[in-house]
Amino acid sequence: MASGDVNYSNTGSTSNVVTKGPVVDNLKSEASRTSGELRDLKNSRVTPSTTTADGQPLTHYHSLLYSLLSWEQPRATAVSFASVIGFIFAARYLPLLRWAFKILYMSLGLTATVEIAGQIILKKGITSGFRPRRYYTIPKETVEAVLEDLEQLVDFFLIEFQRILFAENVLHTVAAFTAAFTGYWLIRFVPLWGLAVIAVTTTYFAPLVYISNREIIDAQISNLQEIINSQTNQLKDLAGERTSQATGLMKQYVGEYSSKAQEYIGSRRSTSPEMSKVPTPVKAEEPIPESVIAPVTEPLIKQEDFPEAPKVAPVAQAVESVEPTEQAAEQTEREPLLAV
């Protein structure tokens, strides 16, 4: 009796350790916290109040991914990171597509075998007996919600790509350039699945590193911005000085060339013979000598040289025919001369 009690007590203590121990309690508490954070992460999918630089509203995926990558719910973020990495390794090392076809043909083969056996043995289909009265369909509301969510996801990627491309935030553009340049060189040596692992790890842990060292990183970024601004101001001042010097030299050269051109034009006017001849003014009171006045010569052609114009219109006269005379002359020319 005592040995049975001992065995029963040992069995009870073992079951209590397995079901009610501190490890199990810790796992249950972690599971409840994780489920709560996943629920909070799902509820954080709301349209943010902030907009783009041109006033365009953002999508609810902006708030969701910000909450996910900022590690506001660390357990939910860790679960999503582990899920993505597990899917990449599974797609690399596990024949998932082959397994899907295997499960499909085994299910269909089992269904067909059971149905045929029921028809032969029981004269009644077994699989067809589980057929629902109405086949399952996707509700229209669910389809519309999924399509709307897919549209929001596509808009999120398009908006973020354009914000990076047009340098709405220069730091984000520089970070994207660095990532693209690094990926361009790594793709030559690293396989695609390895590059995907590196990209996912960087995406998840880069914000965590920034959040953990925000003060130091912000100080370094502000110092770098001050250096860039000072260098930019120096370049602007130097460019302004060079521009003013070039403008002054240009004005000086233009003034010199214009003065030389005016001098050249003045010298040409003074040396030209037409301009050097100055007419002497003639006094109106003094009489003009007769020797200066040129004699008036009579015209060579006079009016009497031309015939008088007829005053009566000419009358048309009949013209006699000249043909017989011409024929007689031709006959005279053709007759031979007779020798006397």
Image (cartoon, rainbow, N blue to C red):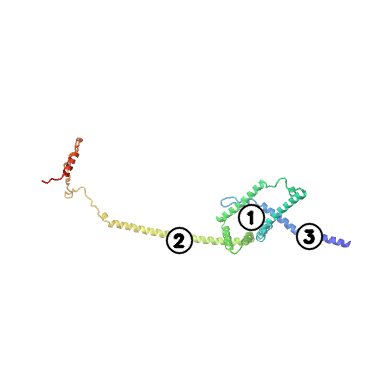
Type of amino acid at the residue the image marks with label 3: Val
Q: Residue 18 shows which numbered tag? A: 3
Picture residue at 64% right of the left edge, 55% below the top:
65
Picture residue at 87% right of the left edge, 61% below the top:
4
Which residue is labeled 2 in the image? 242
- Distance from disc 2 to disc 3, alpha carbons, whole Å, reads 83 Å
Q: Position of residue 306 (x, y in %)?
A: 17, 42
Query: Which element type, helix, strand or loop, lies under badge 1?
Result: helix
Q: Residue 258 shows which numbered tag? A: none
First of labels 2, 1 by sequence position: 1
Q: Position of residue 182 (x, y in %)?
A: 58, 62
Is label 2 or label 3 in front? Answer: 3
Query: Which element type, helix, strand or loop, lies under badge 2?
Result: helix
| Pointers 2 and 1 in contact (C-beta within 8 Å) | no
Going by the picture, which residue comes out furthest to the left? 340
| Pointers 2 and 3 in contact (C-beta within 8 Å) | no
First of labels 1, 3 by sequence position: 3
Q: Residue 65 shows which numbered tag? A: 1
Picture residue at 38% right of the left edge, 59% below the top:
253
Type of amino acid at the residue the image marks with label 2: Arg
Picture residue at 67% right of the left edge, 52% below the top:
42
Q: Dividing the picture into quarters, in which one does residue 157 lie?
A: bottom right
Type of amino acid at the residue the image marks with label 1: Leu
